[in-house]
Image (cartoon, helix red, strand yellow):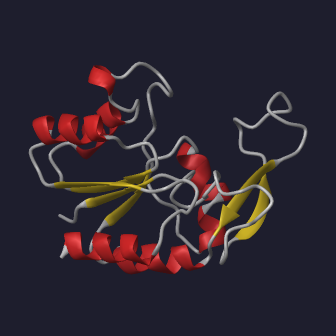
Amino acid sequence: MKPLLLIDVDGPLNPYAAKAQRRPEGYSTHRMRPTGWTEKESAKPLRVWLNHGHGAELLALADAYELVWATTWKDEANDWIGPHLGLPRLPFIDWPVMHGRAPRGTFWKTQYVLEYAGERPFAWIDDDITAMDHEYVDQRHPARTLLMRVDERIGLVRKDFDALADWAA
């Protein structure tokens, strides 16, 4: 059974923290209104920057991994993000609670990532992974893992895709 590749959207695929006046090179701007983005947040749709080359990079990794959305977008990543990247519909982690309390100073997603993975090996790309998450996963997960923190100002880069391919091999 292939390891899981758990994919966050905001940060790794959408470098939302890049300077607002400068779209990152290689990215295009998309305006979206996912369910959680209401008039309360902003009258304007959400700005999302996507690099269309990331879809091909992720599809190339699909030979070695089972791709899974690990994002607050949940299944809506299949409607709003995947089509722009040329990705098929992917399974997703349906977080039982979002932004809730987390054990021992970990990111709120970490406990649910472990539940979803079961005993399978996994790589996880997210912009909120910390040393506490590494420690928590190392102590509790029986299979090998790769927790990759991606800079939310830059998004995924060539060396990240190479590291994911190397780890799977």
Quarter of the rendering occupied by the N terminus: bottom left
- Locate residue 53, reporting x and y percent: 57, 79
Q: Is residue 109 above or below residue 86?
A: above
Quarter in which the C terminus is drawn: bottom left
**Which of the 4 image quadrants contains residue 146?**
bottom left
Is residue 57 toward the left or the right of residue 80 in the image? left
Residue 155 in picture, x, y percent from top left: 53, 62
Q: Is residue 138 above or below residue 102?
A: below
Residue at screen point 38% across, 70% down: 160
Looking at the image, residue 77 sits to the left or right of residue 116; the answer is right
Residue 27 at x, y percent in the picture: 68, 72
Residue at 62%, 76% (x, y): give it.
52
Task: Identify which residue, 77 or 169, lies in the foreground.
Answer: 169
Residue at 59 percent of width and 64 percent of height: 82
Position of residue 110 in the picture relative to residue 1 (left or right)? right
Residue 124: x and y in percent read 34, 53
Q: Quadrant of residue 136?
A: top left
The residue drawn where x is 53% and y is 44% is 74
Q: Residue placed farthest to the top in the image?
A: 101
